[in-house]
Image (spheres, helix red, strand yellow):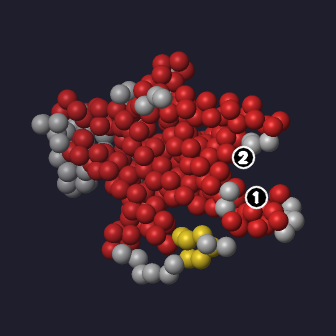
Amino acid sequence: MSEFRRARPSVAEIAAAAVAAVLLLAVAIPGLLAPHDPLAIAPDQAFRPPGGTHPFGTDESGRDILSRVIFGARDSLLIGLAATAAGLGLGLVLGGLAGGSAKRGLAPLRFAADRIIEALFSFPGMLLALLIIAIRGPGVSSVVIAVALGTAPGYARMVRGGIRSAIGSAPVEAARLQGDRPARVWSTLILPEAMRPVVVLAALGIGHAVILSAALGFLGLGSPPPAPEWGAMLNAGRPYLVRAWWLTVFPGACIMLAGLAATVLARALDRRGRFR
């Protein structure tokens, strides 16, 4: 049974919610928010500083940075969300098999799931992502798979620990002694207890996935140019950092704000959500 702790949101939580709302709006309707075509080239407008009709300035090809940042939210955030969903799904499967397959007939599944989790944990997230992309080649789908595999072990280990802890808890033992059906015990006692920290971790994972996908985009392994992806924009603006600071500052600020907003909202969820 869950109880939601009512409390007034802090200033940081309100600001994080506002940032998240703006980013989601940019993902949903970028064409209505962007003042220009993000791919339109205007050489005579190259390296215009922020101001006037280009609030965030223009790049080396005269493309509007504000429009590219807005359209870039779609690629960057959708990659982060898709990778988090895929990593969470894989983590739930592996963690469920590793934590709940205690019967003799299912012991091999438990052993195999434990070994897979340990093997995935033995690779740093970025190294594993680079390995996957080296095998599959660069691209959005490769980034999603790479980030998902890099984050799945964390979810799997938490699910595994939560299930094993819940199985041996007093409420579960009492329910079994009372003759409750196994399906009811799992659905009402074991899974809710195991999933509570995973939900918060997944919310944190969205920000981590956005940052990791941006890092891969910075290395040129994500969306191909001239797609307006935040990490790729950072890399494209790097040679002009002294001459045109706005090429890197604005996409970098978006990456930072997205990760920070996800972290603040996840911690707010953790403080308010209580399973008892």
Instruction: Give the label on residue 232, or none.
Output: none
Task: Residue 229: name its quadrant.
Answer: top left
Task: Identify the image quadrant of residue 182.
Answer: bottom right
**Residue contact at pointers 1 and 2, CB within 8 angstroms:** yes
Within-10-Å neighbours for mark 2: few <14, some 14–19, many 20+: many
- Residue 5 image offset from top left, x and y in percent: 51, 78
Q: Residue furthest left?
A: 242
- Residue 191: % across, % down: 69, 58
- Which quadrant does the N terminus fall into? bottom right
Query: 108 or 169: which is nearer to us?
Result: 169
Residue 186's disc number: 1
Amino acid under disc 1: Trp
Above or below, 257 relative to 223: below
Crowding near the residue tagged with mark 1, few <14, some 14–19, many ≥20 C-alpha atoms within 10 Å: some
User: Could you tell me which quadrant the C terminus lies in?
Assistant: bottom right
Q: Secondary structure at mark 2?
A: helix
- Residue pictured at 17% horizontal, 42% vertical: 245
| Residue displayed at 29% across by 32% down | 235
**Disc 1, SS:** helix
Residue 114 seen in this snapshot: yes
Q: Position of residue 41 (x, y in %)?
A: 33, 35
Quick one: label 1 or label 2, which is nearer the N terminus?
Answer: 2
Please name the residue shown 53% across and 52% down the image: 202
Answer left or right for 179 relative to 25.
Answer: right
Residue 55 drawn at (x, y percent): 25, 54
> Could you tell whether 238 is left or right of 28 in the image?
left
Query: What residue is disc 2 on?
Result: 100
Amino acid type shown at disc 2: Gly
Q: Nearer the viewer, residue 136 or 157?
A: 157
